[in-house]
Image: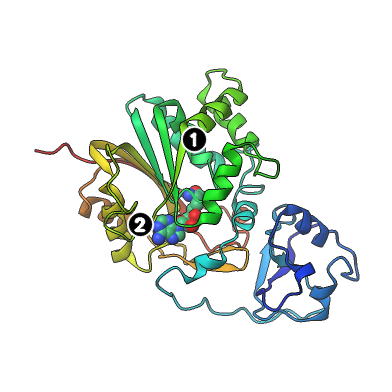
């Protein structure tokens, strides 16, 4: 089966039995290809409120997207206006977000050229120097994901995860507690153990990260004090993946957010950022989140304006096969920067 034409269904007024925001089981049901669509009767009984054609790989069916065979293909719609604030985040569905980004084809560990292995390699290679270590690393806008912490956790006594949304913080707690139904990060952990090359059993890394992830805190990067109070002592390292550009309405706000989160880092501390290039939106279930489209110079400029010294900058071009329709990202940047010592 090739790429299917799917439609993004705005949720209201779906009947309760048709709410499909809760896990890959429902996606599997919807993608079962019954020719009359009877696996998803409501979908064939009513048109979408806001149809949007999205070509998508069948193995990465995002939760919340439903095949609607009988309806003609509508004309593509223009992207919504860039709305400041976080109205879209009220609808952010962690499970859908994970399905969109952290299963194949984007998380295909058989290819080092795939985006997720590229991200993990950037982090593993940077931490392998041994230069970035200390007591506390803070991860800003962790979302429902822990992949970004897998190399970091070897070098810090404590990892502080943060997110604006309680649903994401709860998703992280579920993984830390090892609850059934939590997202399965084991392929990621196995891959990181492999590229780190120490022969460590992956279960040991999993336990180490669980043990070091002791605080999962609310955060708002648009505040001068993102945690609501200063972090004591300030972090030895700061990590943030796909957060600042995804929550900022424009480049100026991205720059201010960088300054705000930088305030949690001690002088001389290291900052590692992964983020989207040229992206204007992404999907997370019913939520369509605006993103400020950045180019490489925007990122370099914001780091410089925020007082960081750039140590490494890498970029990745998103291959056509990974442009699945869950966002319009052009590429990914990786930054290693350092906050100068005072004085
Ligand atoms: C694109 S997700 C990134 C998640 C994860 N770090 C990753 O690498 O996939 C953006 C995250 O930013 C969070 N967020 C939204 N508004 C925020 C804010 N004002 N301050 C900090 N985080 C925010 C969202 O809840 C979401 O988890």
Packing grade of label 1 (10 A; few <14, some 14-19, many >=20) is some
Which residue was labeled with disc 2?
221
Residue in the picture at 67% in, 47% down: 104
Name the colour scheme.
Answer: rainbow
Residue 278 % position (x, y): 44, 62
Q: Quadrant of the N terminus?
A: bottom right
Residue 67 % position (x, y): 77, 68
User: Does the beta carbon of the residue at mark 2 sit less than 8 Å from ligand 1?
Assistant: yes
Q: Residue 12: in sight, yes or no?
A: yes
Residue 46: image quadrant is bottom right
Q: Residue 317: in sight, yes or no?
A: no
Q: Which mark is residue 175?
A: none
Q: Quadrant of the C terminus?
A: top left
Which residue was labeled with disc 1?
121
Residue 222: image quadrant is bottom left
Residue in the picture at 83% in, 80% down: 45
């Amino acid at each position: 089966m090739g790429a299917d034409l799917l439609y993004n269904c705005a949720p209201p007024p779906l009947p309760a039995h048709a709410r499909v925001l809760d896990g890959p089981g429902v996606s599997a049901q919807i993608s079962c290809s019954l020719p009359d669509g009877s696996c998803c009767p409501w979908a064939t009984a009513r048109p979408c409120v806001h149809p949007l054609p999205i070509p998508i790989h069948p193995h990465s069916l995002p939760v919340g997207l439903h095949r609607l065979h009988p309806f003609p293909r509508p004309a593509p719609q223009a992207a919504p206006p860039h709305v400041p604030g976080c109205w879209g985040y009220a609808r952010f569905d962690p499970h859908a977000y994970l399905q969109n980004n952290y299963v194949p084809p984007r998380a295909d560990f058989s290819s080092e050229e795939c985006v997720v292995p590229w991200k993990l390699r950037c982090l593993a290679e940077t931490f392998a120097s041994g230069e970035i270590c200390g007591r506390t690393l803070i991860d800003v806008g962790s979302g429902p994901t822990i992949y970004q912490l897998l190399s970091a956790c070897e070098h810090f006594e404590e990892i502080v995860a943060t997110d604006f949304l309680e649903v994401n913080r709860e998703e992280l707690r579920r993984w830390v507690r090892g609850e059934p139904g939590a997202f399965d990060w084991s392929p990621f952990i196995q891959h990181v153990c492999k590229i780190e090359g120490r022969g460590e059993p992956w279960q040991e890394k999993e336990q180490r990260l669980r043990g070091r992830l002791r605080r999962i805190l609310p955060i708002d990067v648009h505040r001068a004090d993102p945690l609501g109070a200063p972090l004591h002592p300030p972090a030895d390292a700061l990590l943030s993946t796909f957060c600042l550009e995804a929550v900022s309405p424009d480049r100026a706000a991205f720059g201010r957010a960088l300054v705000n989160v930088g305030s949690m880092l001690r002088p001389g501390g290291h900052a590692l950022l992964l983020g989207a290039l040229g992206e204007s939106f992404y999907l997370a279930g019913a939520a369509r989140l605006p993103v400020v489209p950045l180019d490489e110079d925007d990122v370099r400029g914001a780091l410089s304006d925020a007082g960081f010294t750039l140590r490494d900058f890498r970029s990745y071009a998103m291959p056509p096969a990974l442009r699945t329709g869950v966002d319009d990202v052009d590429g990914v940047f990786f930054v290693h920067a350092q906050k100068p010592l005072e004085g």
